[in-house]
Amino acid sequence: MSGSNNHDMRTPLGKVRGLGSAREGTEHFWRQRLTAVANIPLMLFFVGLLIVLNGADFATVRASLANPFVSLVLALMLLSGLYHMRLGMQVVIEDYIHGEGLKVTLIMLNTFFTVAVGVASLFALLKLAFGG
């Protein structure tokens, strides 16, 4: 092999695209695991907040959300949860949709949906937190 001991196991198409055999699977895997671990304390905080605020009036809820710590943790929960959701749905789409055009379209729609839900949720949180 002309002086090279490098055995590349990628397909010719993978070599042209510059991707590994599983495309960007390792990075995707670790991002999904990282968000899963981050979601544990964030979701526990969220559920605890819901329990504490159960039955509270609007003014009490608004006052709780005006606390910078509470609103920051809720914003982190939204961002981490939505990103985790997007990653998970992308895996489902890539695994079960076989037409490349449809797959790309659904992955784009998955991203747009996540961004739309995130923007609306963060807007609502900020509006409540700042009393707008």
Image (cartoon, rainbow, N blue to C red):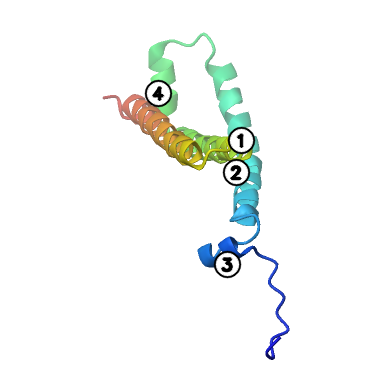
Q: Which mark is residue 12?
A: none
Q: Is residue 3 above or below residue 105?
A: below
Which image quadrant for residue 122? top left
Spot occupied by residue 69 in the image (x, y as percentages of width and height)? 47, 37
Q: Are marks 2 and 1 in contact (CB under 8 Å)?
A: no
Look at the numbered discs 3 and 1 and tell me whether their residues touch, using CB distance below 8 Å.
no
Q: Amino acid at mark 4?
A: Ala
* Amino acid carrying mark 1 in the image: Val
Q: Nearer the viewer, residue 73 or 56?
A: 73
Instruction: Give the residue number, with chain letter if any, for mark 4.
Output: 63
**Point 66% across, 43% down: residue:** 37
Disc 4 versus disc 1: nearer the observer: 1
What's the distance in space between the residues labelled 2 and 3, CA to CA? 30 Å
Q: Earlier in the sequence, mark 4 or mark 3?
A: 3
Taking 66 as reference, is 102 left or right?
right
* SS category of the residue bearing label 2: helix
Q: Of the numbered discs in the image, which one, if any, rests on residue 15?
A: 3
Residue at mark 1: 92
Q: Is residue 8 left or right of residue 66?
A: right
Between discs 2 and 3, the one toward the N terminus: 3
**Residues marked 2 and 4 touching at CB (< 8 Å):** no
Which secondary structure lies at badge 1?
A: helix
Amino acid identity at mark 3: Lys
Q: Going by the image, does 66 lie left or right of 37?
A: left
Q: Could you give the CA–CA distance between mark 3 and mark 1, rounded to whole angstroms?
A: 25 Å
> In the image, which disc is placed on residue 35?
2
Q: Earlier in the sequence, mark 4 or mark 1?
A: 4
| Alpha-carbon span between mark 4 and mark 3 | 56 Å
Q: Tell me which numbered mark, 3 or 1, is placed earlier along the sequence.
A: 3
Residue closest to the eye, 112 or 74: 112
